[in-house]
Image: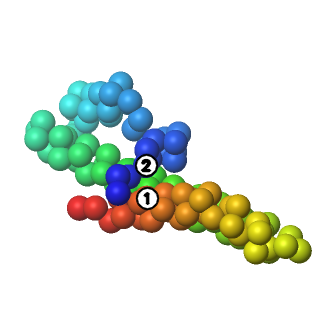
């Protein structure tokens, strides 16, 4: 199972583009108060990008799980729930599989 795209779940303050990452690196490389060498900046940037990806995957899993819950809630409101369950099963499974894929992606090393 491949992980869905996590980028829609990134926060506005997260590093989204190469320009964002370059600006982040410039702050640490140009700043005279820091005594970081380039490998330290690279390692910090790599850890930050991984943390932001994991957090975005967690938000994606929660959003998909909320879709599952909303769909189940709306199905339960119908009188002929058996028929509606059969019609909505593919959508329900798609949301559920996406939630599980996001959850697995958030746990990747």
Q: Which residue lies at the image location 43% right of the left edge and 59% below the top edge?
A: 102
Q: Looking at the rendering, in which quadrant would you find the N terminus?
A: bottom left
In the rendered image, residue 46, in percent from the top left (x then y), is placed at 23, 46
What secondary structure is marked by label 1?
A: helix
Q: Nearer the viewer, residue 101 or 32?
A: 101
Q: Looking at the rendering, in which quadrant would you find the C terminus?
A: bottom left
Above or below, comparing residue 77 to residue 32 in the picture: below
Q: Nearer the viewer, residue 39 or 51?
A: 51
Q: Earlier in the sequence, mark 1 or mark 2?
A: 2
Q: Is residue 3 left or right of residue 22?
A: right
Q: Nearer the viewer, residue 61 or 50?
A: 61
In the rendered image, residue 62, in percent from the top left (x then y), is placed at 55, 63
Label count reads: 2
Q: Which residue lies at the image location 35% right of the left edge and 25% below the top edge?
A: 19
In the rendered image, residue 72, in percent from the top left (x then y), is placed at 71, 70
Q: Are marks 1 and 2 in contact (CB under 8 Å)?
A: yes
Q: Nearer the viewer, residue 28 or 77?
A: 77
Q: Residue furthest top?
A: 19
What secondary structure is marked by label 2?
A: loop
Above or below, comparing residue 47 to residue 26 in the picture: below
Q: Is residue 50 left or right of residue 95?
A: left
Residue indicated by mark 2: 4
Which label was assigned to residue 82?
A: none
**Is any part of residue 91 visible from this angle?**
yes
Q: Which residue lies at the image location 38% right of the left edge and 30% below the top edge?
A: 17
Image quadrant in which you'd find residue 14: top left
Residue indicated by mark 1: 102
């Amino acid at each position: 199972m491949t992980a869905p795209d996590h980028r829609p779940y990134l926060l506005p303050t997260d590093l989204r583009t190469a320009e964002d990452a370059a600006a982040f690196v410039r702050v640490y490389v140009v700043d005279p108060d820091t005594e970081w060498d380039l490998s330290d900046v690279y390692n910090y940037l790599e850890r930050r990008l991984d943390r932001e990806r994991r957090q975005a995957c967690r938000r994606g899993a929660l959003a998909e799980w909320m879709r599952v819950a909303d769909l189940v809630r709306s199905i339960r409101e119908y009188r002929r729930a058996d028929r509606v369950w059969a019609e909505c099963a593919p959508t329900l499974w798609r949301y559920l599989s996406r939630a599980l894929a996001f959850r697995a992606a958030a746990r990747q090393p």
